[in-house]
Image (tube, rainbow, N blue to C red):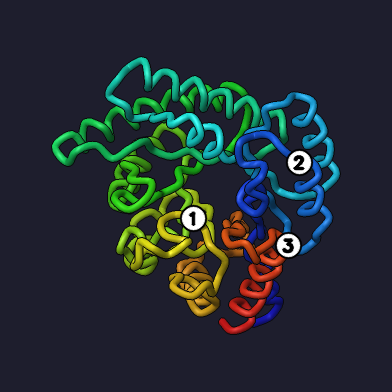
Amino acid sequence: MENFSIYRYMKLGIVHFKAYPQVSNGEGPIVETLRKIVEDDFWTAVEVGWMKDPKVRHEAKKLLECSHMEVCYANQPRMFSQKLDLNSFDPKERKKAINAMKNGVDEAFQLGATCMRVFSGKYPEESKKEEAKKILIDSLREICEYTNSQGEMGIYMKIFDYDIDKCFLIGHFKDAAEVASVLHKEYKNFGVLADLSHFPLLRETPEEAIPLVKEFPMHFHIGSCAFRDKRHPGYGDLQPRFGMPGGEIDTPQVRDYFRLLLNLKLLNPETRPVLSAEVRPLLAEETSEVVIANTKRVIKEAWATI
């Protein structure tokens, strides 16, 4: 195929606060570690999160302005650390979650992000699932309204597991499609983020699930997971390195994911969506630098063997 460079089909990113987990609480060496990513021209996009200190946020903004990278903002650090839930049945808790995510919107615009990540709250008991989805839609509608009042930004709902680790409402791709279809009718900038590492946790395959949501704007993550043995150090949604023994994802699965997304024309020269690696060091012998190098090799080999 002519001009089959990976950069022709996607903006290749990495999740900053996972690659360097010491900054995942919004503090720590944020600018110093972000600079390492910015200085590596393998990456053309970066996903950043909560930065509590306004001075640090200003420094990061200036660094990102120089980088010529696509910037995405992820609300996970802000929301997860405070256990906030957009589909809580408690109106006070739900309002707290909505306000926190609005603060994330403000921060995303400050950092020059072109898109941000949203997601559901906890999976309730089965009898309350449909009610929870309606509450989630109302919460996301308020966040979309707020975001669009500030400027242009893509809003992508990330899909998590529903019964292993995060235990989130969204959840099955069928449920994600139902929520996204309502919101996308009103907000054309609302889409879906599909994470390769979550398919094993959901007991769904990309081939089955992606077609359910491909009509909406899409971004993608690649990563790994472990769920067959609860004693595994990477058990759950911890984003272990590719190829970790007992893990689910390595080069062949990344290759097949690339191939599927190409066949569905979701990776293409016209839209060039963001596809980010979400990996982190978990074991004593693992460093951020080693895990990032591992990831780059997997991406190169997976793309080369399509």
Question: For the C terminus, which image quadrant?
Answer: bottom right
Which numbered marker is on residue 238? Answer: 1
Q: Please name the residue shown 68% across and 34% down the image.
A: 27
Question: For the N terminus, which image quadrant?
Answer: bottom right
Could you classify mark 2 by the number of other residues whose Cα lies within 10 Å: few (under 14), some (14-19), or many (20 or more)?
few
Q: Please name the residue shown 80% across and 49% down the image.
A: 68
Disc 3 element: helix
Could you classify mark 1 by the number of other residues whose Cα lies within 10 Å: few (under 14), some (14-19), or many (20 or more)?
many
- x, y percent for residue 89: 27, 24
Q: Of callouts 1 and 2, which one flags the residue occurring earlier in the amino acid sequence? A: 2
Q: Please name the residue shown 75% across and 50% down the image.
A: 69
Amino acid at circle 1:
Leu
Disc 2 element: loop
In the picture shown, does residue 14 fall above or below 42?
A: above
Q: Please state which of residues 95 and 219 is positioned toward the viewer in this rendering.
A: 95
Q: Of callouts 3 and 2, which one flags the residue occurring earlier in the amino acid sequence? A: 2
The image quadrant of residue 129 is top left
Label 1 and label 2: CA atoms lie apart by 21 Å
Amino acid at circle 2:
Pro
In the picture shown, does residue 167 fall above or below 210?
A: above
- x, y percent for residue 82: 48, 29
The reply to whether the C-beta atoms of the residues labelled 3 and 2 are less than 8 Å apart is no
Which numbered marker is on residue 289? Answer: 3
Which numbered marker is on residue 29? Answer: 2
